[in-house]
Image (cartoon, helix red, strand yellow):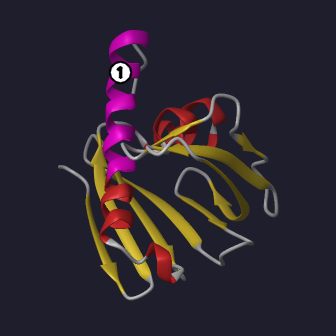
Amino acid sequence: MRARATLDSDELIAVRHLDADPEMVWRMFTTPEHLAAFWGGDHATIRTGSVSADLRIGGAFTLATVGVDGCSHPLRFRYEVIDPPSLLSFSSPHSGLVTEISLEPAGVGTMVRIRQRALPADLRTEQARTGLTGVLERLALVLTDLTRTEGMNL
């Protein structure tokens, strides 16, 4: 299943099935080196070493993206909900955007649902919708590569 996303008013939801168990997918979303490998999707890259994750309620999640225009965009989030391996939520103190990532066992893998709400007006775009699906597609590729190159039991 390829990622699909819907944009409705100030809410963006993307879903995708991944061929990995929820514990592995959880590690992908909570470990800096894994986040850096996929979070930008195909529209941005993540600066090496820019990702930090203080994985506790109130802890900071930070990263710096570099867009196709070469401009760097530092991002900072605050962890709101941490319920391994099923629910992770963080918010942007700057914009008010709230991101919720839910992981559900599904067959031999995991159904991932990313819900972003309170989207600022400048993020209520087709580019944001395709960007979020790109993040999930990149995550699927990274998981496939990890399985192939490291022989990880996903």
Instruction: Confirm whether the magenta stretch covers residue 91.
Output: no
In the rendered image, residue 69, in percent from the top left (x then y), is placed at 47, 45
Amino acid type indicated by mark 1: Asp
Up the image or down, 142 lies above or below 140; here it is above
The secondary structure that most of the magenta stretch takes on is helix
Q: Residue at x 34, y 64 (%)?
A: 127
Quarter of the image for residue 31 reads: top right
Query: Which one is nearer the viewer's eye here, 22 or 29?
Result: 29
Query: Which one is nearer the viewer's eye here, 126 or 58?
Result: 126
Quarter of the image for residue 99 reads: bottom right
Q: Looking at this rendering, what residue extends furthest in the bottom direction? A: 9
Residue at numbered disc 1 = 145
Q: Which residues are magenta?
A: 134-150
Instruction: Confirm whether the magenta stretch covers residue 136.
Output: yes
Query: Which one is nearer the viewer's eye here, 36 or 47?
Result: 47
Q: Alpha-carbon neighbours of circle 1 within 10 Å: few (<14), some, or many (≥20)?
A: few
